[in-house]
Image (tube, helix red, strand yellow):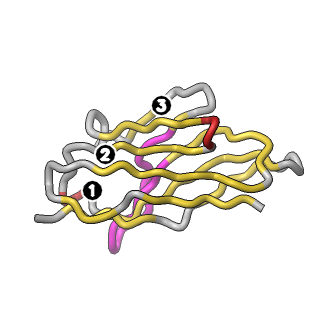
Amino acid sequence: QVQLVESGGGLVQPGGSLRLSCVASGSILAINAMGWYRQAPGKQREFVAIITSGSSTNYAASVKGRFTISRDNAKNTVYLQMNSLKPEDTAVYYCNVIITTTRRESRNYWGQGTQVTVSS
């Protein structure tokens, strides 16, 4: 079994910052790509950022230059530093991690989601 636990969401004013964390635990043999997605009310879930096992990164155009994804392999954790937040960043943020388990099975795992609200 693998679990992803997210934290760090909350209410912030426009222009503010938040840092999201997602910790993976359980029967993990290896962690491959780690990413973040978000889903605003009434909209489909969309890609935000990804970081590979080699630490290459890619971002959605809407967050590039404002958000930074990073990972700590020793802690099985992925972070999303969000700066210059805008009201349109309001959404539930989900981490998504590709994990190879001790059974040597690779698949996507999703976190439970953490709410980010940007409002004055």
Are the residues tagged 3 and 2 within 8 Å (C-beta)? no
Q: Work out whether residue 15 or residue 39 is closer to the camera in this orientation and state it.
A: 15
Viewport quadrant of the N terminus: bottom right
Q: Residue furthest right?
A: 103
Q: Is residue 17 above or below residue 93?
A: above
Q: Residue at x 65, y 57 (%)?
A: 109
Residue at 37 percent of width and 37 percent of height: 68
Q: How many discs appear?
A: 3
Query: Of marks 1 and 2, which one's residue comes earlier in the chain?
Result: 2
Residue at 14% across / 55% down in the picture?
14
What residue is shown with label 1? 89
> Can you tell which mark lies on residue 57?
3
Three-letter code for the amino acid on which mark 1 is drawn: Asp
Residues packed near mark 2 inside 10 Å, few (<14), some (14 to 19) or many (20 plus): many
Question: Is disc 1 surrounded by few (<14), some (14 to 19) or many (20+) residues within 10 Å?
Answer: many
Secondary structure at badge 3 equals strand
| Alpha carbon distance from label 3 to label 2 | 15 Å
Residue 15 position, x and y percent, is 15, 49
Local secondary structure at mark 2: strand
What residue does disc 2 label? 82
Identify the magenta region: 36-50
Task: Give the spatial CA distance, label 1 vs label 3.
Answer: 20 Å
Q: Given the image, on which type of amino acid does mark 2 rest? A: Met
How far apart are the alpha carbons under marks 1 and 2? 9 Å
